Amino acid sequence: MTTLKTVVSIVPLLAILVSVAAAFGIFFLRNTPNGREACSITAALVKFGLVMSLYPLIRDGYVVECPLVAFPAGLMPNLGFALRVDALGFLFAAVASFLWILTTMYSIGYMRALNEHSQARYYVCFALALTGALGVAFSANLLTLFLFYELITVSTYLLVVHDETEESYSAGTKYLTYLMGTGKLFFLPAIIFTFGLTGTLDFKSAGIFSGVDPFWVGLTLVLFVAGVAKSGLMPFHNWLPSAMVAPTPVSALLHAVAVVKAGVFTVVRIVVHVYGVDFLSHLGIGVVMAFVASVTVVGASVVALRQDNLKLRLAYSTISQLAYVVLGVMLLTPDGVRGSILQIVAHAFGKITLFFCAGAIYVGIHKKYISEMAGIGKTMPWTMGAFTVGAFSMIGVPPLAGFAVKWRLLLGSMEAQQIPIALVLLGSTLLNAAYFLPVIKKAYFEESDDAAHQHEAPLIMRVALVTTAIGTCLVGIYSDFIVGLLKGIA
């Protein structure tokens, strides 16, 4: 096992606090649209710069640590709040902080084009959500992770209810019930059990459960997976389609940057650094959880087929696609785990592209339903071109990011000698094609009766969605480089 070198730095804390400072700045500039937007963009650029400044250390095999608050040894030994940046956390933070730049740009065009209300509150909550996301990425232990995990829930609640309608408040209630309810009922007890069984909550490269009775290992693993409702696994998924009442940039944030991505990242972190891949593999527990994830992969895809609302189809697609992350890591094989982590990156770029396109379509032609989108491939070529790239990546067309993921997951299923899992992956690819290709067909091969009134969204929105589409291509082409960062995992 590789021994990781450590270095102490305040940079991880600064990267997290940038968003907090931005939230205060946006609040004070709430009556100055240009000022609050400039504050948002500047903070996003600074955050990304701070995260990327850690790359040389991560590349050279270092782990960056930042102790925060330790509880008194006589009261609660081995407990406290601390930050720790390894390759896994760095990768998630780099993706989240980069996409925050583009989502902020996109939000400016979207919110101005539709003259949305309460824009200052929107940008404040957006900044706090990214604070939570980076906190999850940089957490050194389960206690710190749980704190930031709950911050994401609270800050994004106000984004879900942004429209202040009866429908949005109903969705917000369901959102809090699922995310905070499962956290209190399952996640928090799992953390307490873990501390009682192991005497620590720190993330370790080989896990912390070695020598614990298999019964308790299985019980706590089930509690952890059930408690991470943000991952969207069935039957804890109903909050996610309901949350689509939020503005489209919020939907993009929920799916690609903060909420569900933080959920599946947490599952990967727990499997790899709380239990340890080798330990779980020895007990034979992972395969059962992989089959549970397979149900979500297939079931959510089937539901997506029936959705005419584009955002709802994308929401169920997310539920299915992110179950790949859980499925892959639970295979407990090298390619399975690496494919799982690569899916966090690939899905982030591909799905944020698709949601950006959905929002651009609404701004350009005020349509939400796929059945009303005939001919928009001709009147909105940039938007539909990017949508096609994102959709093809979700399907798994080479050389896009989704293909690199599915190839590694297939290899992982072969390593685990699980032919049924390989068949699930192949079957889900057909289902992906079945719910994405009709959208492309309607856009390019059917004629519109209203072409004269159709136009592209504002330029700043198009720049954002084209950039993420290019990112989807680059992630696929350079997937080996991304996986190379994870050489110490699996």
Image (cartoon, helix red, strand yellow):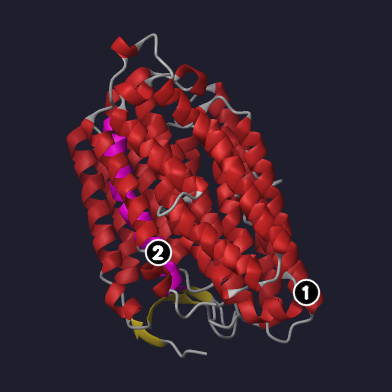
Asked whether the viewer can see residue 23, the reply is: no
Q: Residues within 10 Å of mark 1 (few under 14, many from 20)?
A: some
The structure residue drawn at horizontal position 71% and vertical position 46%, both measured from the top left corner, is 235
Query: Which mark's residue is nearer the viewer, 1 or 2?
Result: 2
Say if the magenta span includes residue 28: no
Q: Which residue is mark 2?
A: 479
| Magenta-colored segment: predominant secondary structure | helix
Where disc 1 sits, the SS reads: helix
Q: Are marks 1 and 2 in contact (CB under 8 Å)?
A: no
The structure residue drawn at horizontal position 38% and vertical position 34%, both measured from the top left corner, is 357
Q: Which residue is mark 1?
A: 216
Residue 255 drawn at (x, y percent): 48, 45
**Residue 31: quadrant of the picture:** top left
Q: Which residues are magenta?
A: 82-109
The structure residue drawn at horizontal position 62% and vertical position 52%, both measured from the top left corner, is 426
Choose the circle earlier in sequence order: 1 or 2: 1
**Residue 448: quadrant of the picture:** top left
Closest to the observer, 393 or 294? 393
Q: How far apart, in angstroms, are the residues tagged by discs 1 and 2?
A: 37 Å
Residue 71 drawn at (x, y percent): 52, 77
Q: Is residue 30 left or right of residue 272?
A: left
Where disc 2 sits, the SS reads: helix
Closest to the observer, 346 or 461? 346
